[in-house]
Image: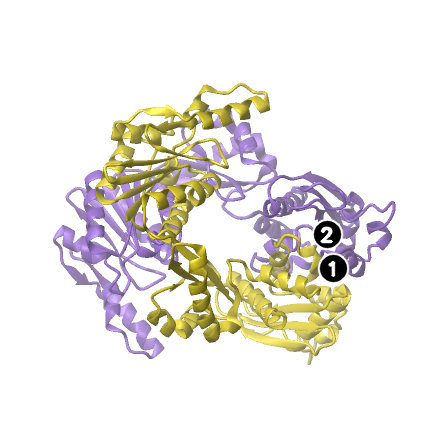
Chain colours: A purple, B yellow
């Protein structure tokens, strides 16, 4: 099946927002085994939308629309498609009831234009909107399928993953759905991981193994078509075992979660607590760890000691360690060790981690940009400091330093 | 002039990357006064690319291509366009010389396919690539313009801003370029700002005033067409004065920089230093402030005291303040004041800021999600605590709390 994605919205043509919907829908359609041949963006203009529909139906079997289902006069997708197909718009009563209940529960009168959100094409399949008011639509006509989804990602995504995908599966009939598992890696770059798995990737045709691009993370997707999840899982399990044999030391999760979330889960399991002392990373370690909901049970806190004064005042590191003739300096293995140890003690935590280095843009203490010392102090264990030589700009060096020390901690906890 | 943007690349149709190029190009074309009517994405397939070109030239005066200029067999844009227009590809000698010099300086033999990157359509305008090897192209034929840009954003953006825009200006002939200024606001939401400026926005036709959507920030763009920057600036200055009269207390910069960068600049000017004590925001304040290069002169550091033990240990806040019968608790005005004061003293800084509150998802100490106390302690001044009631999910509450305390600090420093 050949598909075209048509995003409707003048704000896209003005560059006010980026078309992330097209990426999401392309991924989901690929998972359903549907090939996307074109993506189109058109403004809130009936003549041009009509033109896009005519072109789309001439070259694709499925047109997936996103946007233009809302209440305003600019929301035209249903009107224009109904006109193209010579169908009427009818009211979807259950959606109308939801809209009316919402307004009456808020005690405000319903603006008449909200009725538009409950309209659907006659003889079509309504798609429930679990996160908003505009009903979606699945329409089949003359060998072409039309899937109408809302524009806001928080409404479009659940509809596509739920009612939209179910309708497409049904329309595809005997075709088997695609089941996938995401594997997340740390401590290794994408090209090195691919090199390790190259033979397997080339040899293996089912399940397929493919890189799954996500900014700043390394992930691969293992996918197979099967009649049911029960039949897909053993095939996926076997491929994952083969991947584990080749790169298991870097594989931290078999689902799409960030490394910090996996770390918090492991700390919770082992009932241990963590504290951090950061210099070059400026609080990014603490920020990522605390972005995991409920992390206060496992993360006691941290310090961001950007100056020597703060390292001395908050962590009790001697000034003679940091400055003056013969001092090791702030960016040094021994300072990293002291920072990790002192913050662990201050927080009465099981682990103390530290990062001190040069994130750039300029070198510091005569040390090069990208040199970072990562310390890990553990209760009852000798402190270890890892020396990192990182590339990239300031933002990348900070992120890579944080992920590198998280990876070392994960190796201890797994 | 009506334009269509055609992004070429199968990785876009697979959803492996998001089409940020289309957003960037739409913004730049709008600045040139060119209306974008369609955006299209097509894969690395000659027949479908040809089809996209035929459709595009039938409905637009300018086709802007991005992608498909590289050395591989998948890079087809120039070949297919040359074929469509019945033109030959010729070698652009200066680009070829750059490619040859690069390979010889690295001491490795040039792979023959790299010659492809120096090819251009005959009788066209070459566009220098300052960040990569593939030469761009400006082609005029039969009333239609074709602008060929590389796909990687780090090559495409400078080419569009430099040689590409210059060529388009020349082709548009007498048309005046558009000059713009971005105004950045804090301490006010987008809809409230628009309400304040509504009369002005509706009354004013030149320069135009338009919201400039950026995630999590409030910005507007003031634009006018003029023969030169010298003639545009006084017109823009006058409009900015009118905006200042209506909303000056929220206008923190007349260029597109984040609030934290403006704060660091003001601290530097007044030779003052800042320290932070964070609870609910988990290090986000420190992380954003230290993301500004060179901020170590103005930011001494901070603490992330996620537990009461850390608040006591690092900041010396009495446990009786935090826990037990009759205690104010960690989320309280008095704890916020103590955190700001103690971190200021520990860092020997001029300002200490603090954030303590409930970011969610669950309430804490019986206090509701979104309640945040923001403290500011200043050397020689009474400490002030602001009570915030923030909406949004965990991520939004953290970000809004951080930006709110930055705004209060900016009010003091400006």
Pick the front one: B325 or B315: B315
Q: CA distance from mark 1 to mark 2?
A: 9 Å
**Crowd class of label 1 (few under 14; some 14 to 19; many from 20; radius 10 Å):** many
Marks 1, 2 in one chain:
yes
Q: Residue furthest left?
A: A86
Residue matched to label 2? A352
Would residue A14 appear left or right of A311 to someone viewing this image?
Answer: left
The label on residue A347 is: 1
Q: Nearer the viewer, residue B303 or B215?
A: B215
Residue B361 in view: no
Note whether B329 is above or below A41 in the view shown: below
Would residue B236 be seen by someone viewing this image from the given angle?
yes
Residue B85 lies in quadrant: top left
| The quadrant where residue A400 appears | top right
Which chain letter goes with mark 1? Answer: A
Q: Position of residue A160 (x, y in %)?
A: 34, 51
Q: Residues within 10 Å of mark 2 (few under 14, many from 20)?
A: many
Residue occupying image coordinates x 32% and y 78%: A108
Horizontal side of residue A116 vs B133, given as left or right: left
Look at the numbered disc 2 and give the secondary structure of its residue.
Answer: strand
Q: Is residue A21 left or right of residue A377?
A: left
Circles 1 and 2: CB atoms closer than 8 Å: yes
What residue is drawn where x is 62% and y is 47%? A394
């Amino acid at each position: 099946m050949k598909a075209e994605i048509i995003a409707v919205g003048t704000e896209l043509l003005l560059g006010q927002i980026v078309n992330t919907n097209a990426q999401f829908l392309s991924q989901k359609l690929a998972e359903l085994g549907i090939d996307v041949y074109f993506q189109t963006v058109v403004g809130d203009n009936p003549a041009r939308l009509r033109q896009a529909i005519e072109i789309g139906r001439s070259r694709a079997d499925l047109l997936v629309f996103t946007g233009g289902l809302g209440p305003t006069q600019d929301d035209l997708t249903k009107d224009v498609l109904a006109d193209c197909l010579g169908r009427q718009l009818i009211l979807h009563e259950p959606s109308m009831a939801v809209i009316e209940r919402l307004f009456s529960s808020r005690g405000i009168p319903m603006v008449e234009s909200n009725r538009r959100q409950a309209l659907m094409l006659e003889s079509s399949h309504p798609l429930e909107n679990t996160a908003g008011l505009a009903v979606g639509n699945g329409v089949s006509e003359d060998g072409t399928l039309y899937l109408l989804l809302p524009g806001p990602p928080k409404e479009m995504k659940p509809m596509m993953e739920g009612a939209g995908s179910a309708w497409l599966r049904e329309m595809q009939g005997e075709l088997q759905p695609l089941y996938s598992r995401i594997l997340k890696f740390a401590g290794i770059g994408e090209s090195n991981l691919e090199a390790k798995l190259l033979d397997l990737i080339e040899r293996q045709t089912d399940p397929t193994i493919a890189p799954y691009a996500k900014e700043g993370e390394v992930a691969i997707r293992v996918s197979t078509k099967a009649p049911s999840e029960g039949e897909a899982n053993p095939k996926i399990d076997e491929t994952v075992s083969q991947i584990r044999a080749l790169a298991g030391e870097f594989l931290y999760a078999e689902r799409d979660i960030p490394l910090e979330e996996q770390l918090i889960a492991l700390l919770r399991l082992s009932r241990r607590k963590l504290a951090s002392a950061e210099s070059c990373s400026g609080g990014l370690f603490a920020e990522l760890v605390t972005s995991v909901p409920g992390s206060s049970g496992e993360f006691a806190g941290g310090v961001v000691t950007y100056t020597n004064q703060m390292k001395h005042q908050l962590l009790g590191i001697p000034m003679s360690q940091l400055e003056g003739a013969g001092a090791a300096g702030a960016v040094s293995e021994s300072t990293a060790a002291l920072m990790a140890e002192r913050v662990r003690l201050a927080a009465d935590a099981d682990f103390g981690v530290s990062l001190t280095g040069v994130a750039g843009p300029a070198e510091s203490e005569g040390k090069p940009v990208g040199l970072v010392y990562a310390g890990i102090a553990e209760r009852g264990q000798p402190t270890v400091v890892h020396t990192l030589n990182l590339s990239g700009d300031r933002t990348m060096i900070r992120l890579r330093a944080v992920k590198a020390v998280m990876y070392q901690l994960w190796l201890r906890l797994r």
